[in-house]
Image (cartoon, helix red, strand yellow):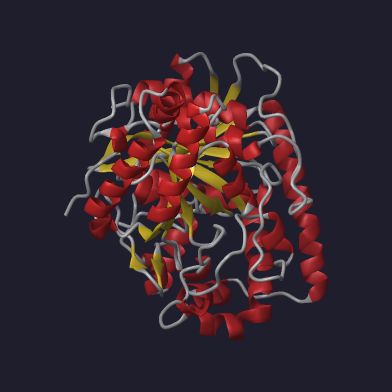
Amino acid sequence: MSGDGGADGALWRWEAGAIARAVRAGEVSAAEVVDRHLERIAAVNPEVNAVTRVLADTARAQAAEVDSRRAAGVDPGPLAGVPFTVKENIAVGGVPTTHGARWFRDATATADAPPVARLRAAGAIPVGRGNMPTLTLAGMHSRSELFGDTANPWDPRVTPGGSSGGDGAAVAAGLAPLGLGNDSGGSVRVPAAFCGVTGLKPTEGRFPADHRIGAQDPPLSAQTIPVDGPLARTVGDLRLAFEALAGPGADPRDPRAVPVPTRGPDVGPARVAVVADPGGRGVHPWVREAVDTVAAHLSDAGYDVTEVPDVPRHDEALEAYGRMIMTEFAATWPSVKRILGEEGHHYIEMSMARTAPVDLPEYLRLTGVRLTVRRAWAEFLAEYPLLLGPVFTSPPPAPGLESRDEEGHRAVTEALRLCTVTGFAGVPAVAVPAGVWGGLPQGVQIVGRAFREDLCLTAAEAVERRVGRLTPVDPRP
């Protein structure tokens, strides 16, 4: 249900766009919006453990500023009064950036990271921090050494996903209409799919970011592959967040970011390639049904939908991604392992056992392979501006399956494969709900050309109009 009524106890159900319109028109105050969401957090977060730290005092102070600006006739911004959560590895000024690890529990940030600053400048208000796997390295399930497990509000017997799982669960359960996470191989898209919300993995270089831990920048793969991205309950809200995050001009803290316009030229009824089983490694029947359902919705909306044999350089991209990432991890693994704490190291150790680090000549060769993969994707998307495929090729698994044993690790990493390949290729993707199968939401992703997030969002909106909105939901025992 969308929010278009007055100020009442259901404000936490409202879409971000409806909140911003009402605050800008003076129909509801930002203070009321924040208070209703803080009440929802207090009532529901004990069940889902999505929010690790509630930013009540600063949220109320910023809400008062938004209301004061509006009262003075100053534009309070396109996201005026909209609460959002921020993943534990993205800096919020004056608040610890813990990465879910005890080692960083007191590492207070001196300033907002660029995406937080841009959302705040648009009038949005941080209300809490989202849980994540420790250092993002402890697995796909959002279980941190510092804050414990986040539950999927649809069913605690399955994971909410990760690594931005706290923000996905928070958005799904009505704790905030927007969440801010990051994604290199599915860390925004998977929680969106598992929690029944939408999520955007932007093009590499689309949003300015700062992923330093302390003063040190990360190595090459960790510089270029992870991107910050929003989660929301509707595609319209996702678009509002996207436009605020893209923002005007450059940010000196991130010389990689490119200030490209948020909307490109019209390409007419876009061709859509469909790949339900990337790499031909198998796909669950529910996932296949979800992809087929969305393909039919897009065809009904006027898109030229064609099933194609596979995505570009699937196996080559998976191998190169794994070897580059594991080589970078191996260099610092002894110290990182200590920070991960008890049990947190299993996932990466199993990953390194399956994909061994390489020597310097091979690593340098792999940097060329990445360009080859990106070129192949650019050529593919020149023919098909959009690709439809699964986010995860099976239903949501049990919490922590990927860290239990080799079989669970293989099952989860293979199910993530299209997220991994598209992350390595640096292209944008929107995760959008396809419906509910077996009592759980099933999401798909719409992948697009570099810097054409607008095409992905427009197609996702066409899907959403036919599927409807699945959240917010009350947590289920």
Q: Say which quarter of the image contains residue 197.
A: top left
Residue farthest toward the front in the current orientation of the protein: 72
Q: From what the image shows, is residue 453 above or below residue 89? A: above
Taking 201 as reference, is 101 above or below it?
Answer: below
In the picture, which quadrant includes the N terminus? top left
Looking at the rendered image, the quarter that the C terminus falls into is: bottom left
Query: Which residue is at a point 55% across and 31% down the rendered structure image?
Result: 77
The residue shown at (60%, 47%) is: 117
Residue with the most extreme left position: 477
Q: Residue 388's x, y, as percent?
A: 52, 33
Residue 394 appearing in the image: no
Residue 340: percent from the left, percent from the top?
49, 78
85 or 404: nearer the eye?
85
Left or right: 291 as drawn, with respect to 339 = left
Q: Which residue is nearer to you in this view: 100 or 302? A: 100
Horizontal side, residue 11 vs residue 292: left or right: left
- Looking at the picture, tell me which residue is in the foreground, 378 or 220: 220
Residue 35 sits above or below residue 248 on the image: below
- Whole-percent x, y for residue 213 in the image: 63, 69
Location of residue 300 by image quarter: top left
Q: How many marks?
A: 0
* Residue shown at the point (37%, 39%) measured from the top left: 31
Residue 15 visible in image = yes
Residue 275's x, y, as percent? 52, 37
